[in-house]
Amino acid sequence: MTPSVSGSIAGGALGSGNMLNAYGNAGLAFKTDIDDKVSLALIIDQPFGADVAYTNTDPGYPLGGTVATVNTTAITAVGRYKFNENMSIHFGPRYLTASGNYGLVLGAPVYASTYSSGSGTGYVAGVAYERKDIAMRVALTYSSAIDLELDGTFGDLAAEMPETWNLDFQSGVAANTLVFGSVHWAGWKEAHITDTLFGPLVDWSEDTVTYTLGVGRKFSDSFSGAFSVGYEEAQGGIATNLAPTDGYTSVSLGGTYTMANGVELTGGMRYIMAGDATTNVPTSATTVTPSDFSDNSAVAIGLKVAYTY
């Protein structure tokens, strides 16, 4: 992911510079069928993350030097049971680890703490309906909230990652053509990331709902492509300086090439138009100044290698 997110105060006189560093995520998944009804999967991914660095600010921008990072890794084991050719359920435990750091600078260092790795557990559960004759699949999955406690060099960190609901669907609409999409709800309103001494680092006023809709086309036995759009409604209000965007619209284009030996190579690009936001930048111990973050974007490039045997 290569984001470009910047803001300014004083009518544009002082800019934050790009305050998000480029970052990458990696994942690994393995699935096997035990028999005609039972299958198991192991998924390793990095579901949450941040790399904030106000290190390219104009001289005099209040937050110059402020940094924050979040690194997470999740391990999910999922079992699926098929009642018949159409209906199935899936369930499994989820283990999440996290670490990071936070350093606030307001002209001079104000607060800093590095948080060692901590962990928490949750679960996923869901149900799916399929019809192979029209390439239809509809799946609803719930992921529980996960509580984390991380020891810090100064203040400790207490966090609750949100519970989520995810509705995924696809269906054939013509020969070699299907539509697909998803609706993702995340309970950010009840989530929090709080330093036990400094107080809340990030909080959210509303839950989020993200929509995706796309079309896929099989062009040959070895190559298929897909195009999709995504949308997340803005929450409004004042955003945090560690996440100074509000909603987004995205477009994605990708393709899959299947080799004769069963290896699938999938690549794609996603362009994200971040929603405008306003934050409150502390200019002293008792006053804040609005900072306008607008016309920001990000580019994401993904690659997946899959092998079926």
Image (cartoon, grey):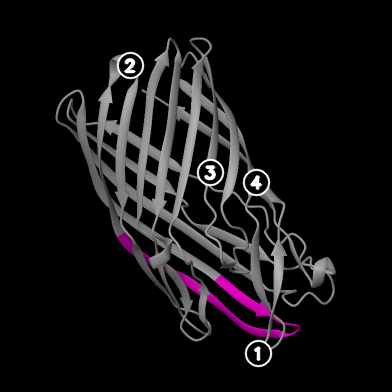
Q: Within the magenta stretch, is there residue 212?
A: no
Amino acid tagged 4:
Met
The numbered mark, 3 or 4, whose residue comes first in the sequence reads 3
10 Å neighbourhood of mark 3: few (<14), some, or many (≥20)? some
Q: Of helix, strand and loop, which one carries label 2?
A: helix
**Cα distance in 3D space between marks 1 and 3:** 37 Å
**Cα distance in 3D space between marks 3 and 4:** 10 Å
User: What are the residue bounds of the magenta stretch?
Assistant: 101-121
Q: Quadrant of residue 146?
A: bottom left
Residue 290 is situated, as x and y percent measured from the top left of the image, at: 70, 73
Q: Of helix, strand and loop, which one carries label 1?
A: loop
Q: Are marks 4 and 2 in contact (CB under 8 Å)?
A: no
Quarter occupied by the C terminus: top left
- The residue that appears at 54% across and 31% down in the rendered structure is 228
Residue 240 is situated, as x and y percent measured from the top left of the image, at: 59, 69
Residue assigned mark 2: 134
Please tell me whether residue 242 is drawn above or below residue 247 in the rendered image.
below
Residue assigned mark 3: 231
**Cα distance in 3D space between marks 4 and 2:** 34 Å
- The residue that appears at 53% across and 40% down in the rendered structure is 230
> Predominant secondary structure in magenta?
strand
Residue 286 badge: 1
Q: Within the magenta stretch, is there residue 113?
A: yes
Residue 46 or residue 125, whichever sits in front: 125
Amino acid tagged 3:
Tyr
Residue assigned mark 4: 273
Q: Quadrant of residue 53?
A: bottom right
Q: Of helix, strand and loop, which one carries label 3?
A: strand
Q: Are marks 1 and 4 in contact (CB under 8 Å)?
A: no
